[in-house]
Amino acid sequence: MARVSAARARVMELRSGTVDRDQLQLAHGELLEAMELYAAELARRRLPIPPALRDDLRLYREIRVRPTTGRPYRPRSDA
């Protein structure tokens, strides 16, 4: 959880002031990785994943798969 907190703080820091999109994208990737590891550890211990973490994981996974072209973004269907 400490790694998730540190990654969240880094994202918030990069969002303030002038935004460097490349650094912010890297920070988002680090945050996603930290959340994935935390969720995997919770699952390994057979503990429930908190709803906020589950929702954040979904959000950051969608951010990761967004197309880089100029086309409008449409979320993937979970179906």
Image (spheres, rainbow, N blue to C red):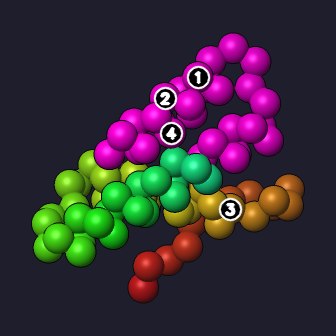
Q: Is residue 40 magenta?
A: no
**Mark 3 vs mark 1: in front:** 1
Front position in the image: 27 or 66? 27
Front position in the image: 41 or 49? 41
Q: Residue at x 29, y 66 (%)?
A: 41
Return the mark for residue 66: 3
Report the amino acid beneath label 1.
Glu
Return the mark for residue 7: 4
- Name the residue that disc number 1 marks: 13
Asked where in the image residue 20 lies, by quadrant, the reply is: top right
Q: Is disc 2 in contact with disc 1, using a CB cutoff of under 8 Å?
A: yes
Report the amino acid beneath label 3.
Arg
- Name the residue that disc number 2 marks: 9
Residue range of the region highlighted in magenta in the rendering: 1-28
Mark before the other along the chain sequence, 3 or 4: 4
Mark before the other along the chain sequence, 4 or 1: 4
**Helix or strand or loop: what does disc 2 sit on?**
helix
User: What whole-number distance in Å separates the C-alpha atoms at marks 4 and 2?
Assistant: 5 Å
Residue 56 visible in the displayed image: yes
